[in-house]
């Protein structure tokens, strides 16, 4: 889905655990590979990732520490891979945007687990962007629904309005 997207990819995902040798899933590499292709072909392309910078509602101390630092470690792995592919970090982040949600100084937890490409194809699943969900080893069984066509654009508009109640514009 990431590598085949023509113009854009949107992620809303609870957990980002990818990008370095520590992880077996190749999601971070797919993100960079798609950005590299956009740079080489000089075509407009954007990836937006909405995730949690931390998960303060986790009960255990070590789980909180892991949830705080794993997104940072994932981004460092993505950056290292981008540099090894010959693009600068500035070039990477001209196409790849990472955001978190906050309201009145309080972090808003993202738990949507959506991947959408070109407002035409989307997967809404229980899977996080992690080895527990995407690995070549036996892992969690996750379930998802794929949407295609005009329903994806309507779904994304609904999703954006839930996240941003003042959002009144088109998704484009």
Image (spheres, helix red, strand yellow):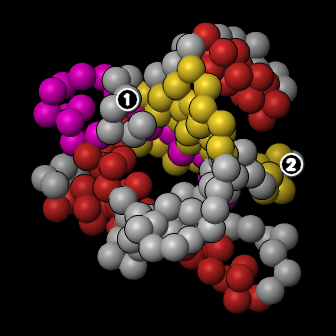
Query: For mark 1, does the 10 Å Cα neighbourhood hold few (<14), some (14 to 19), or many (20 or more) residues?
Result: some
The answer to whether marks 1 and 2 mark residues whose Cβ atoms lie closer than 8 Å is no
Residue placed at 70% from the left, 89% from the top? 62
Residue 104 has which mark? 2
Q: Position of residue 100 (x, y in %)?
A: 65, 50
> Dot 2 lies on which element?
loop
Give how far apart the Cα atoms at labels 1 and 2 are: 35 Å
- In screen coordinates, is 71 left or right of 23? right
Instruction: Give the residue pinned by disc 1.
Output: 5
Q: Is residue 110 visible?
A: no
Is 23 situated above or below 116?
A: below
- In screen coordinates, is 134 left or right of 151? left
Residue placed at 45% from the left, 66% from the top? 135
- In screen coordinates, is 38 left or right of 86? right
Magenta highlight on residue 106: no
Q: Position of residue 161 (x, y in %)?
A: 79, 25
Residue placed at 84% from the left, 26% from the top? 165
> Dot 1 lies on which element?
loop
The quarter in which the C terminus is drawn is top right
Query: For mark 2, does the 10 Å Cα neighbourhood hold few (<14), some (14 to 19), or many (20 or more) residues?
Result: few
Give whichever of discs 1 and 2 has the lower sequence position.
Answer: 1
Q: Residue 18 falls in which quadrant of the image?
A: bottom left
Q: Position of residue 53 (x, y in %)?
A: 64, 62
Residue placed at 38% from the left, 23% from the top? 7
Magenta region: 34-53
Is 101 situated above or below 138?
A: above
């Amino acid at each position: 889905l990431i590598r085949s997207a023509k113009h854009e990819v949107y992620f809303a995902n609870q957990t980002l655990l990818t990008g370095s040798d520590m992880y077996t899933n190749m999601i971070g590499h797919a993100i960079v590979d798609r950005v590299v292709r956009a740079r080489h072909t000089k075509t407009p392309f954007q990836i937006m990732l909405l995730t949690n910078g931390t998960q303060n509602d986790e009960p255990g101390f070590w789980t909180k520490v892991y949830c705080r630092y794993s997104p940072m470690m994932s981004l460092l792995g993505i950056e290292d891979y981008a540099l090894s592919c010959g693009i600068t970090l500035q070039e990477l982040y001209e196409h790849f945007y990472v955001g978190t949600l906050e309201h009145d100084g309080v972090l808003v937890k993202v738990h949507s687990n959506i991947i959408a490409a070109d407002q035409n194809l989307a997967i809404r699943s229980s899977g996080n962007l992690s080895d527990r969900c995407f690995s070549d080893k036996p892992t969690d069984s996750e379930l998802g629904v794929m949407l295609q066509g005009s329903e994806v654009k309507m779904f994304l508009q609904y999703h954006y309005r839930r996240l941003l109640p003042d959002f009144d514009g088109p998704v484009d």
